[in-house]
Image: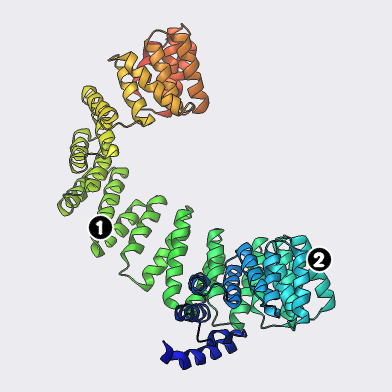
Amino acid sequence: MKTHNKIFSLVFIILSVISFRPAFAYQDRNKNPLAIEHYINGILIKLIQNDNRAALAEFVLAESYDPDDPFLKTEIAECYIALGNYAQAYVKTKEALNLGLDDADTYRILALSASGLGRCDEAGKYIDKAGLLGFNEANILIVCTKISQNIEMSLKTLKKLQKKYPQNANVNSALGELYHQNKNTKKAVKYLNKSIQLAPENSNSYISLVNTYIEIERFDTAMSILNTYVQKFPWDKKVLEQYIDKLLTLNRFDSALKAINIYIKRDSLKGKAYFDLYAMKALESNEYYVALQAYLKMLEWDDTDYLSYYFAGKCYEELWCPESAAVMFRCALDLENLPDIYTDLALLWSRNDEPESLFAISQRAINEYPDSAGVWYWCGIAFRRLDYYELASHYFAQACYLQPDDIGALFSLADTRERAEYRSESIILLDSIITKLDNDSPLLLNYLGYILVDDSFNIEYGKKLIRRALDKEPKNPAYLDSYGWALFREGKTKKALKYLKNAEKFYDYDTEIQLHLGDIYYKLGKVDEARKHWWRSVQIDPDNKISWFRLKITNPE
């Protein structure tokens, strides 16, 4: 390493000039070479990459080889301040002071550390010492008040400073930012505008002013200031990015779209990525028309973008335009042969009651992806919607074969067999899920329990299963209904009525609950009350044959 001493000396002189700190201590031949190496790495990372976390790691390693160097401790403290760890920064700077590094910069770092810990009086003492040793007190005060946890004290200090330096743009900017932080919008706007008047090139004041107007939802004003900012600082895309992100978080899609259009002029590639994010955010917020317009716009730029076709199809589907949705899904499928597009088309045809199209797309999906449990499962869901129970059972069974531990597929198979009136098969399947797979899902417990009770197959066991489900979700109307029905099957009619009334209280728009209430009231001899609930049941579900039959046989005419 000795052959590199001159190189190290030169590097340290350069770094000393750049960082305005004396690094000549490392000229000592007794310095550990590894300490020098890690120190240089830390400085370069800090200056070039602006990565304080990585720089901190290097400085800590340097300190491990040279534990008594006070300069290293202040470098570590600076990194801690940048990362918001003021307690560690304070400790390290105190160590540097105890080791004899008694200069203006050490007191500056101590002032910042104390401010970050909310010790404003102590910070003031260090600021005074830094000032006596040549540092600009106003600049230190500005930074201290920005990071201080004591907002009242910081405001008091900055107001005094503003009176002393009324034409200082940085002071006005810092005061405006602090008022914004303190939710005093009127004063924040006043001082930030003054800062811009005093220093039109002060980018921080523009950014703070934009954020202030966003906070009070004056988006047009914020947009106007942003336009001015973009004209003055056309190279700064970061502010636009922050603004777009914030608007999208607030679901302000109109303002976000304007900002994205400005951004596209500066960076078309990333601008289009923002447009994609805008569309996705709108979709997540159920703003389907907004999202659709965005996806159609993206297709104007690139008609080979299969994802834009796919999500446009999803938007059309939500907007009740099945024909347009089908066109978009088909276009997506022509570009990219993905299983999700097949299954979405299958579900679309089932919702639109088009069995021929459903048969065709399902067969094509299975031919393309014969080993995909997901394709078999979702095609099964589509067929079950159209009451093709035998065919749906076949699809679910194949999904279970491909993925034996898939609870959803097993449950769907059991549910479909029950709908097809093969309750014994359904009971066996559900029981195997609960026992063999050790599944304690309240949904499964209630489903199997209800079948056992309703069929009088094993009322006692079914009641226990429903009770377990109800213990997990005591306010679930479906489970309350099932338990009440179990009591009714046991002949405990009055007790059953209590549970059914609770179920109705939590959810009165359920055909099964209304049917059961009617049956219980009929058993209690209250025919008019029973008919009222059966009538409510058929209003909810006109295809409820049992309720229609009850109404017919109890018709007084």
Please, is residue 312 above or below residue 391 in the view? Answer: below
What's the residue type where badge 2 is placed? Lys
Q: Is residue 189 visible?
A: no
Please, is residue 55 above or below residue 461 in the view? Answer: below
Residue 108 image-quadrant placement: bottom right
Marker disc for residue 47 = none
Does dot 2 land on a helix, a strand or a loop? helix
Residue 87 image-quadrant placement: bottom right
Q: Horizontal placement of 334 versus 13: left or right?
A: left
Q: Is residue 304 visible?
A: yes
What quarter of the picture does the N terminus occupy?
A: bottom left
Q: Horizontal placement of 175 versus 352: left or right?
A: right
Residue at the spot 29% in from the left edge and 15% down from the top edge: 458
Which residue corresponds to mark 2? Answer: 156
Which residue corresponds to mark 1? Answer: 338
Residue 29 is situated, as x and y percent measured from the top left of the image, at 50, 87
Residue at the spot 74% in from the left edge and 65% down from the top edge: 179
Residue 255 is situated, as x and y percent measured from the top left of the image, at 57, 66
